Amino acid sequence: AQSVTQPDIHITVSEGASLELRCNYSYGATPYLFWYVQSPGQGLQLLLKYFSGDTLVQGIKGFEAEFKRSQSSFNLRKPSVHWSDAAEYFCAVGYQKVTFGTGTKLQVIP
Amino acid sequence: DAGVTQSPTHLIKTRGQQVTLRCSPKSGHDTVSWYQQALGQGPQFIFQYYEEEERQRGNFPDRFSGHQFPNYSSELNVNALLLGDSALYLCASSLWKGATNEKLFFGSGTQLSVL
């Protein structure tokens, strides 16, 4: 069965600092991987996705993620965090049924 | 261009009651998926509808049922509500492409509270 693990429940970074959110997945074949962001009281917005090809994918809002098959990981990165990035971030895997991780809540301090 | 719209935004029910949630997909989309997001958790897949048929189903009991209409809008029905059904219910729409979910567009959800 497919699954996603986000080991960090909560992360705090200073504005302007770099960010890396961890994601490990379990999937039987070549995974379809996603990162979504959810602001309070809102639905989820897709940041980026990986299906195949270049293992470093670029997304919206300056985010990028790197697929590492050997480590079953798909970590999300941003070189310089803005206060508006404070939200909850979900990693997901799936083809038709998309399985989400439990999320990482990002706090940005000035 | 309207995105995914869900109604109502909030709902309070009591145990044992039945509830119907509604979703209109983004213009041009033909596939609707429903997710349950409990407090502090990630969304969990309930089921997916395409061409008015349930195509995929997650690990939810038969109390959860759905429907898709010819205009692609969808309903989620939950019977015999339990306290544990309290959650944010998210609808996501997409364009069917050989049964993949390349990009899901989510609505803002319906917050269901069961007392």
Image (cartoon, coloured by chain):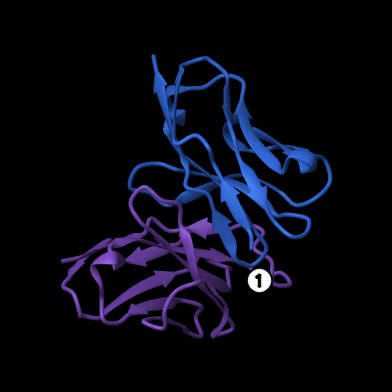
In the rendered image, the residue lying farthest to the right is A53
Above-or-below relation of A17 to A32: above
Numbered disc 1: secondary structure = loop
**Residue at the location (39% across, 14% down)?**
A110
Chain letter corresponding to the colour purple: B
> Which quadrant of the structure image shows residue B107?
bottom left
**Residue at the location (41% across, 70% down)?**
B23
**Residue at the location (65% across, 48% down)?**
A25
Chain letter corresponding to the colour blue: A
The answer to whether any part of residue B75 appears in the image is yes
Q: Residues within 10 Å of mark 1 (few under 14, many from 20)?
A: some
Front residue of A55/B93: it is A55
Q: Which residue is mark 1?
A: B96
> Which quadrant of the structure image shows residue A31?
bottom right
In percent of width and height, residue A58 lies at 70, 36
Q: Split into 4 quadrants, where in the image is the C terminus of chain B?
A: bottom left
Mark 1 belongs to which subunit? B
